[in-house]
Image (tube, grey):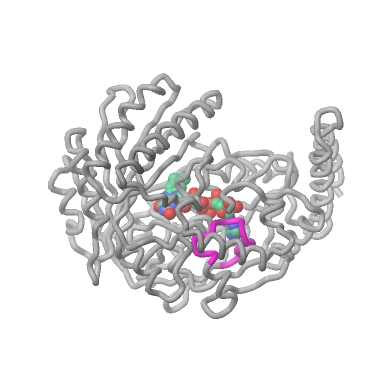
């Protein structure tokens, strides 16, 4: 009955924060609804409920989030152990009309997308099942991509997921998914055979190509937290026992050549591509005021050095090539949680080396506006969309919500870290103003694409702006059909909604 004491403390805190003098009646109602939900959850799932002050509270509310800013203070946290318990939790929360958030791997750095103040957090920590089949793998939403690559490694197979170690499976898969092998196998979303979903009314459905096909399509890029809670993904796997890898470094003078090589990779349009892709980053050293670039490249098979990166190898000052497997490669690139405050912001262009270089130069110049910010860590990142990667979704009979044309595109992104909360607003404003100004110029030049990737977007960006209008209308119809009570649009309001 210890929870009753905690519930009392929550009630006092919530109602105090929403006293009639300081709060609207809507806030008072929300506070009462949260108390209702936490109380119901305590009764229905007593082993799964966590309150402030409990042993796991800090882990679930803070430590499990990547960006420092996304650590918030939920009134209670529920950590279901099965899909049935997720259904019980959703029913309890929705019957009380309580605001809630859902966290998978906790990497999305948009405040409120995966955590909540004065509401209920559903932490998916315990849904960590993994089962390897002949050519698929069944995974729970608690898993990281390293967990998935580790499970598949003994079978010599890979799934199409995150490029670094600890990114969560669910968020990345529901928003699209950039992997090294997109150019051959499509995006992570194109590689999901089935989703087990708990809907807003607590019903459980399995969405596949033939069962709930509309929902199946909508989950391919429609974002987390818009249709239901996914409790299991069945992912396609491919026989790739070994990968050839390269880590390369480039001087400032080689950055234009580096960006030109990135653009060439985007132009891949072969009928039978070799799976190969990269993380391409330009960093700015605040002390020396000098830039340098780095490449993390991965190619299927045993070509050593990996020949798909020849354009980079010609101009790099350092290269470390290896033949390994996806698990051991990913292991090296941890992205520790609660390490940074980081603003993402990006836009997209048609692959054009001169324009990409001028964007990099403008980024470098604009850093003078924030150079005094404590702990500044600026990077300029380029991600590639080749015609071959788009074609996979276009040709598989399902598609995805992006509806992209088969043309070479580059996502150019500012990823900027800093130390102190006092600079949060300033860094957000700088990123927003600069990126949107450059995007307007690209529009005038006729080289801009309106495509926005939810995983790399800033808080202000409309992640559905580049989605064809017909697809947005279809998403809305599907949401209305599957979430009649608008549980995910009315009670879970953080993150990217359409
Ligand atoms: C360091 C770093 C590296 C990255 N690298 C890549 C990369 O290589 N490729 C790439 O494509 N992206 C990458 N991203 C972006 C990444 O895909 C997103 O941050 C993604 O949201 C991470 O998934 P998650 O499960 O950790 O997210 P979370 O923050 O847990 O969730 C993201 C959103 O999905 C919702 N959600 C989570 N689980 C579920 C579920 N089971 N059902 C319904 N909704 C759910 C949440 O409510 C939230 O709105 C990277 C991000 C970071 C910070």
Q: Number of labelled discs?
A: 0
460 left or right of 83?
left
Residue shown at 32% from the left, 50% from the top? 410
Reply above or below: 83 against 316.
below
Reply above or below: 368 against 281.
above
The residue furthest left is: 314
Does residue 403 show up magenta in the picture? no
Q: State the residue in front, 238 or 22.
A: 22
Residue shown at 43% from the left, 79% from the top? 134
Q: Hey, which quadrant is residue 57 in on the image?
A: top right
106 left or right of 255?
right
Reply above or below: 1 against 300.
above
Residue 139 can be seen in this image: yes
Q: State the residue in front, 376 or 407.
A: 407
Q: Magenta stretch mostly in which secondary structure?
A: loop
- x and y, in percent, of residue 116 in the image: 67, 43
Q: State the residue in front, 60 or 395.
A: 395
Does residue 220 show up magenta in the picture? yes
- x and y, in percent, of residue 53 in the image: 74, 39
Reply above or below: 313 against 233.
above
- x and y, in percent, of residue 81 in the image: 67, 62
Residue 165 can be seen in this image: no
Please state the extent of the stretch shown in magenta in the rendering.
218-232
- x and y, in percent, of residue 399 in the image: 44, 69
């Amino acid at each position: 009955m210890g929870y009753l004491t905690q519930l009392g403390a929550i009630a006092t805190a919530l109602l105090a924060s929403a006293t009639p003098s300081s709060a609207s009646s809507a806030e008072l109602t929300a506070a009462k609804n949260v108390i209702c939900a936490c109380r119901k959850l305590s009764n229905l799932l007593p082993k799964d409920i966590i309150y402030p002050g409990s042993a796991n509270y800090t882990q679930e509310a803070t430590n499990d989030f990547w960006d420092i800013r996304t650590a918030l203070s939920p009134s209670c946290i529920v950590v279901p152990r099965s899909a049935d318990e997720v259904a019980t939790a959703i029913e309890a929360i929705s019957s009380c009309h309580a605001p809630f958030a859902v966290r998978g791997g906790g990497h999305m750095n948009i405040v409120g997308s995966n955590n909540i103040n004065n509401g209920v957090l559903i932490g998916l920590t315990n849904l960590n099942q993994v089962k390897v089949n002949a050519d698929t793998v069944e995974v729970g939403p608690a898993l990281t991509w390293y967990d998935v690559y580790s499970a598949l490694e003994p079978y010599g197979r890979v799934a199409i997921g995150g490029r670094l170690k600890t990114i969560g499976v669910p968020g990345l898969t529901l928003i699209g998914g950039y992997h090294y092998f997109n150019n051959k196998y499509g995006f992570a979303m194109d590689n999901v055979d089935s989703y087990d979903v708990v809907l807003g009314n607590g019903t459980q459905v399995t969405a596949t190509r033939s069962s709930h096909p509309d929902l199946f399509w909508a989950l391919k890029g429609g974002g987390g937290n818009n249709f239901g809670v996914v409790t299991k993904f069945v992912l396609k796997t491919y026989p790739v026992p070994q990968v050839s890898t390269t880590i390369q470094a480039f001087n400032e003078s080689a950055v234009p050549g580096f960006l030109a090589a990135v653009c060439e990779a985007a132009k891949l349009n072969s009928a039978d591509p070799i799976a190969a892709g990269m993380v391409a980053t330009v960093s700015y050293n605040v002390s020396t005021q000098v830039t340098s670039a780095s490449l993390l490249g991965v190619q299927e098979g045993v070509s050593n050095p990996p020949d798909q990166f020849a354009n980079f190898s010609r101009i790099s000052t350092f290269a470390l090539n290896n033949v390994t497997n996806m698990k051991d490669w990913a292991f090296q690139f941890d992205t520790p949680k609660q390490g940074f405050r980081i603003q993402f912001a990006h836009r997209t262009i048609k692959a054009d080396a001169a324009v990409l270089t001028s964007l990099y130069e403008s980024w470098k110049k604009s850093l003078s506006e924030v150079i005094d910010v404590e702990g500044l860590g600026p990077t300029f990142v380029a991600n590639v969309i080749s015609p071959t990667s788009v074609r996979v979704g276009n040709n598989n009979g399902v598609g995805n919500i992006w509806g992209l044309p088969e043309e070479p595109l580059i996502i150019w992104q500012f990823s900027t870290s800093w130390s102190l909360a006092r600079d949060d607003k300033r860094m957000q404003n700088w990123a927003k103003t600069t990126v949107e100004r450059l995007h307007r110029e690209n529009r005038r030049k006729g080289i801009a694409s309106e495509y926005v990737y939810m995983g790399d977007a800033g808080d202000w960006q409309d992640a559905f702006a580049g989605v064809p209008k017909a697809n947005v209308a279809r998403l809305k119809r599907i949401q209305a059909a599957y979430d009649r009570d608008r549980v995910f649009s009315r009670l879970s309001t953080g993150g990217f909604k359409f």
